[in-house]
Image (cartoon, coloured by chain):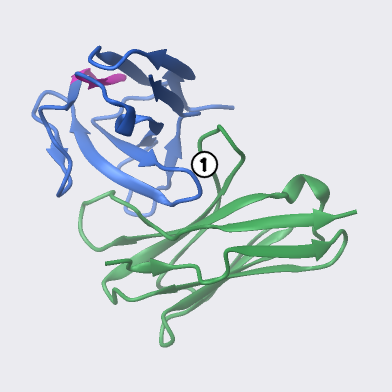
Chain colours: A green, B blue
């Protein structure tokens, strides 16, 4: 049962424009959400996270928005750069002292020059 | 810089042999590490939680006798794929958290590409 869903398998965006990646979750016990970036044959790299007590977190070009009532979060990348071309995974973790993450299926972002 | 180191980055082995993958936390102690697996164009699936000094906790459907995990020290966890078969070919990734804080992200190693021929 997929508790974290990324319904868009791919996204193509012009360099300099905004990339918006979406993620939905079903488990209302999730309280910590993360975005990872992954290049082929490499491990995921942590990008940005947000706890359930916030609705926005910003770090440089990356901003994550959380809508708890809709069980939805999004990652905004602006401006998009060619080096942002990668697979982006949304992940979530539940309450308790359990560090296990549930991952979405990933969205492949291609930034066009 | 990297906080989790994984070795080897890729390995090819013959069917029936065993392969050991090492995961090390760099400059921090990790009482818990996690082993994930990724099939091509799919998401990361948690295989097991490696606990220092105690038995690993395996996710449903993961054979503990096939995927042996040892977490003998606070900086090293190993995953041994025993009697490997072609269907075990996959990308294996370990991860650890820098702290035990509730909102501390997992950091991942660079993964190991296992090909069983």
Check if residue B2 falls in the magenta segment.
no
- Helix, strand, or loop for circle 1? loop
Q: Quadrant of the C terminus of chain B?
A: top left
Residue displayed at 34% across by 53% down: A101
Residue displayed at 12% across by 32% down: B64
Q: Which residue is mark 1?
A: A44
Horizontal side of A27 relative to B93 (left or right) equals left
Q: Nearer the viewer, residue A35 or B37?
A: B37
Given the image, what chain letter belongs to the residue carrying mark 1?
A: A
Residue displayed at 82% across by 61% down: A79
**Residue B66 in the image: above or below residue B45:** above
Residue displayed at 57% across by 69% down: A8
Where residue A78 sits: x, y (%)? 78, 63
Where residue A56 sits: x, y (%)? 57, 72
Q: Is residue B70 visible?
A: yes
- Quarter of the image holding residue A111? bottom right
Q: Nearer the viewer, residue A106 or A84?
A: A106
Q: Farthest residue in the bottom direction?
A: A69
Magenta part of the chain: B71-82
**Residue B97 in the image: above or below residue A79:** above
Where residue A20 sits: x, y (%)? 67, 70
Name the magenta segment's main secondary structure.
strand
Q: Nearer the viewer, residue B16 or A35?
A: B16
């Amino acid at each position: 049962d997929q508790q974290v869903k990324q319904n868009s398998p791919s996204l193509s965006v012009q360099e300099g424009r905004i990339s918006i990646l979406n993620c939905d979750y079903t488990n209302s016990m999730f309280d910590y959400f993360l975005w990872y970036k992954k290049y082929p044959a490499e491990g995921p790299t942590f990008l940005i996270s947000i706890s359930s007590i916030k609705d926005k977190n910003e770090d440089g070009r990356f901003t994550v928005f959380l809508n708890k009532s809709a069980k939805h979060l999004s990652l905004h990348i602006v401006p998009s750069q060619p080096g942002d071309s990668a697979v982006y995974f949304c992940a979530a973790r539940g309450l308790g002292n359990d560090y296990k993450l549930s991952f979405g299926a990933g969205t492949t972002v291609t930034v066009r020059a | 810089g990297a906080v989790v180191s994984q070795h080897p980055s890729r390995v090819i082995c013959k069917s029936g042999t065993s392969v050991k993958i090492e995961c090390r936390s760099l400059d921090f102690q990790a009482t818990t590490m996690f082993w994930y697996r990724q099939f091509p164009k799919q998401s990361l699936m948690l295989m097991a939680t490696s606990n220092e000094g105690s038995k690993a906790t395996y996710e449903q459907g993961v054979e503990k006798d096939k995927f042996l995990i040892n977490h003998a020290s606070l900086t090293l966890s190993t995953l041994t794929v025993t009697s490997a078969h072609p269907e075990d070919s996959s990308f294996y990734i370990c991860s650890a958290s820098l702290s035990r804080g509730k909102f501390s992200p997992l950091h991942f190693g660079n993964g190991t590409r296992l090909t069983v021929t």
